[in-house]
Amino acid sequence: MDILLQLIANGVLLGGVFALISIGLTLIFGIVRVVNFAHGELLMVGLYATWIMATQFGLHPYVAALPLAVAFFFLGALMQRAIIQPLMNADPHIQIFATVGVGTALANAALMIFSADLRSVDLPWARQATDLFGLASVSRGNLVAFAVSFVATGALIAFLNRTHLGRAIRAVAQNRYAAPLMGIDVNRIYAITFGIGAGCVGLAAAVLAPLYPAFPTVGSFFVLTAFVVVVLGGMGSLEGAVVGALIIGLVESLAGYYVAPDLKEVVYFVIFLGILIVRPAGLFGVRGNE
Amino acid sequence: MVTTRRRPLLAGFAAAAAAPRIASAQGGEIKFGALYPFSGGLALLGDESFRGLEVAVEERNGAGGVLGRQIRLAKGDAVDQNQAIGEVRRLMSVERVAAVFGTYASPLSFAATQVTELQGVPYFEMGAISDPITERGFRYVFRTCPRSSDFGVATVGAVADALAPAYGVDPKSLKIAILHEDALYGQTVSGFQEQQIRQRGLTQVEKLAYSARSVDLSSVIQRLRGVNADIVLHTGYQNDIVLFFRGMQEANWKPRMVIGSGAGYSLTDTARAVGPAFEGVMNVDFTQFAVNEQYAPGVSAFVELYKRRYGSDPRSGHSLANYFGGRVYLDAVQRAGSTDKDRIRTAVLATDVAEGTTPTGWGVRFDEKGQNTRVRPFLLQWQGGRQVTVYPAQAAVTQLRPQMGAAG
């Protein structure tokens, strides 16, 4: 029994990690309608940035989170303006090539600069186990990541629903041709949304840095799962991303124990396919939005 | 008038173009290929391996080269199997190398040797451990380093011959679990471990595979905890090793001992990323630098050469293994007296070096398949942030400590 509780705790916390990485992706996916294949590499850049700030300037990774998120906002907006914007009306394949290209360039730049070594932020506090009401033992860093993913998602949902800019972003998502008729500068919205999506990655990187070492290909370890989470939850749906991430996290944890560790991906892809057959737009997706 | 003025100019070009060809025909240089992953995910140890070869070549050049000619290495960057094939073709056809040295990673070696064998170009393997590389009946593929099966023998031997006596228990009473990443490297080594455990009548309680791209190994750890494993034989890369140890810390559980099989377990970076929990962890690998100099004469001289050349300590024993291999093969080419493939084969197979006389402690005696039979990986342990040799006794620099973790 307590092993089951432990597995559920592990799964839920892993889901928190996936959610943190997926919310930025789902925003970009759902609103700018660009499949950002460089998402994982942005995370990698963020992990290195956190590592540099921690080792060179002695900045606590959690303190680095906010400046990093802001810096990534501008980085994302710049990337959208310089690389995606000229291709907004091009064939979707071309956009995919562009983002894949950015990702490859970033990964190899990291390899040139940092070599293939692991760079790890030293924060033993985050890796220590803490007892969860005597039911399960989990790491503090994972608890922090979990909390941050919920707070960030909540804040983003409030922003999208309550503010003028948020409503404008949703309007663009609903109909990118009608929105300009309502006086919305669509291109500006795209840049801002891409920036917010990238900012989420920056935040995620700082929070995850104590848990995962940085190396040039670390992005590819997370990005496939993030895509599954986004499609499972419904593209563009933040609530969907969180629920999708929790499902994947739980399935990974339980299937890894009860089935076999090397078959856990098979299990979650089967569940993924099953859900898509029943709900092609994802759990929280709107039909026609995909 | 115009034409007469042009003639001497053309003649000048012709002379300039012909000049280098004359130089090479006179035999100023002998060119070998160096095929390693220099970029991509394997780049770190690929480059480290290459450095060992480079040191061996420069040393040899300082002593007059081979066959009276200076050696020049033509680098080929093998990121993956396709590129290994492309690059080795380029080395043979464009660079016209006399032989190819490599490769660090087994899949790359598999691919490249298929091509060199067809062309009849000798391939000198110094770092790839997959057994079948020398079991395909190839005539011109040779390997100086140990194989996966040697790792299987050494890891299981470590439990029975070194750890059990240190614990003062019967080896059969130790519950052994095998944990491995699910690609070629992990599958092969763990297969041999399983076979060895069966042969020696030891107790295997679990065998688990996982993808090296995993971002979470908590369920693996719960399984190991569930079977109450005493010893975990782990074959993994770097990131997954870090995840495994962090996961054990989170779960507040660890076995009595973890024994790795080279690669990620040998890297100082891994030890740094894991932290104090890595203290006492054991590993079976190519010869490292904390080895008894009497058994591995020349090892500290190599470290000196390396430091002078690259300005830092070697990053792993891969450079040493390639330095050893490079010296063996260059010596064989010298004895062959030419770059003819059959004379090289005869010279390589005639090599006879006793164990305990080289910087790796390994000897040299090739079998008909081209595999060096006088090699074995040593048992190492992380002590005080360094990896030291603890078994076998003649290579050891210190006693084995049967404790893992900072508390010990």
Image (cartoon, coloured by chain):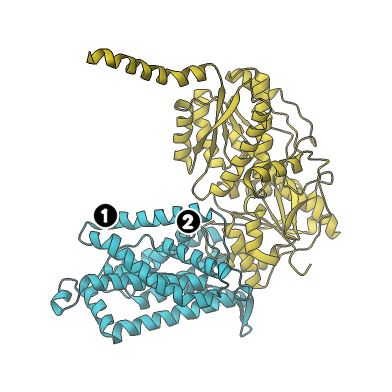
Chain colours: A cyan, B yellow
Q: Quadrant of residue A80?
A: bottom left
Mark 1 falls within which chain? A
**Quadrant the N terminus of chain B occupies:** top left
Q: Is residue B26 above or below residue B184?
A: above
Pointer 2 local density, CA inside 10 Å: few below 14, some 14–19, many at least 20: many
Residue B182, given in percent of the width and then of the height, sits at: 55, 52
Q: Which residue is located at x 36 percent, y 20 percent? A: B13
- Asked if the residue under mark 1 is in contact with the one under mark 2, i.e. CB atoms within 8 Å, the reply is no
Which badge, 2 or 1, comes first in the chain's sequence? 1
CA separation, marks 2 and 1?
24 Å
Q: Secondary structure at mark 1?
A: helix
**Would you say B187 lies left or right of B169 here?**
left
Which mark's residue is nearer the viewer, 2 or 1? 2
Residue B87 is situated, as x and y percent measured from the top left of the image, at 46, 35
| Amino acid type at mark 2 | Ala
Tag shown at residue A94: 1
Residue B260: give x, y in percent of width and height: 68, 54
- Residue at the outermost bottom position: A162
